Image (tube, helix red, strand yellow):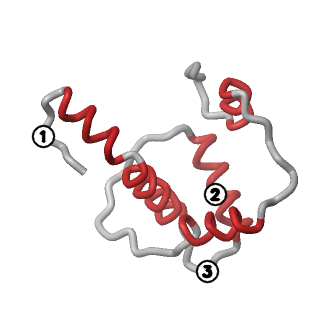
């Protein structure tokens, strides 16, 4: 994937060859909501740097979801935890190859 200066979902879709769909799959929507739209206490926090455009998009999405207690931090935490769990084997393999001590 080509790296762009700013995070633009439309650009990412074009580069990946992904076309947006307009017919929602209710099962996918339900699974997505259960996985990612769960309010959570983020706990001890540490800031990270992401493009402002991405934060603005996330802020708009959170407002549209209208889930009480859901914050950008909780949403992003849910996304990252799911990513790490789903890709655990590949991440561990890459960390072992590099002789790093991080293991998920």
Q: Which mark is residue 101?
A: 1
Q: Which residue is situated farthest in the bottom direction here?
A: 68
Element assignment for label 3: loop
User: Is 77 situated above or below 104?
Assistant: below
Q: What separation in Å lies between label 3 and label 1 (alpha carbons)?
A: 38 Å
Q: Secondary structure at mark 1?
A: loop
For the residues labelled 2 and 3, the Cα–Cα distance comes to 14 Å
Q: Nearer the viewer, mark 3 or mark 1?
A: 1
Q: Residue at x 49, y 56 (%)?
A: 79
The quadrant of the rendering that contains the N terminus is top right
Residue at screen point 53% across, 73% down: 38
Quote the CA–CA distance across marks 1 and 2.
Answer: 35 Å
Looking at the image, do the residues carrying marks 1 and 2 touch, with CB atoms under 8 Å apart? no
SS for callout 2:
helix
Mark sitting earlier along the chain (2/3): 2
Q: Does 101 sit left or right of 34 as displayed?
A: left
Residue 59 got which mark? Answer: 2
Taking the view exactly as shown, the residue that stands out farthest to the right is 22
For label 2, count other residues whose C-alpha is less than 10 Å away and answer few (under 14), some (14-19) or many (20+): few
State the residue position of label 3: 68
Can you give x and y, in whole percent of width and height, for residue 47 in the image?
A: 37, 51
- The percent coordinates of residue 54 (x first, y second) are 60, 43
């Amino acid at each position: 994937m080509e790296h762009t200066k700013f995070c633009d979902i439309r650009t990412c879709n074009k580069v990946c060859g992904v076309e947006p769909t307009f017919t929602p799959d209710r099962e996918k929507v339900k699974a997505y909501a259960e996985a990612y739209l769960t309010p959570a206490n983020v706990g001890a926090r540490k800031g990270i740097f992401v493009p402002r455009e991405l934060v603005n998009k996330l802020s708009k999405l959170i407002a549209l979801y209208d889930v009480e207690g859901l914050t950008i931090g909780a949403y992003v935490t849910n996304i990252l935890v799911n990513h790490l769990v789903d890709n655990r084997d590949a991440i561990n393999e890459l960390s072992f190859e590099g002789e790093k001590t991080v293991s998920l």
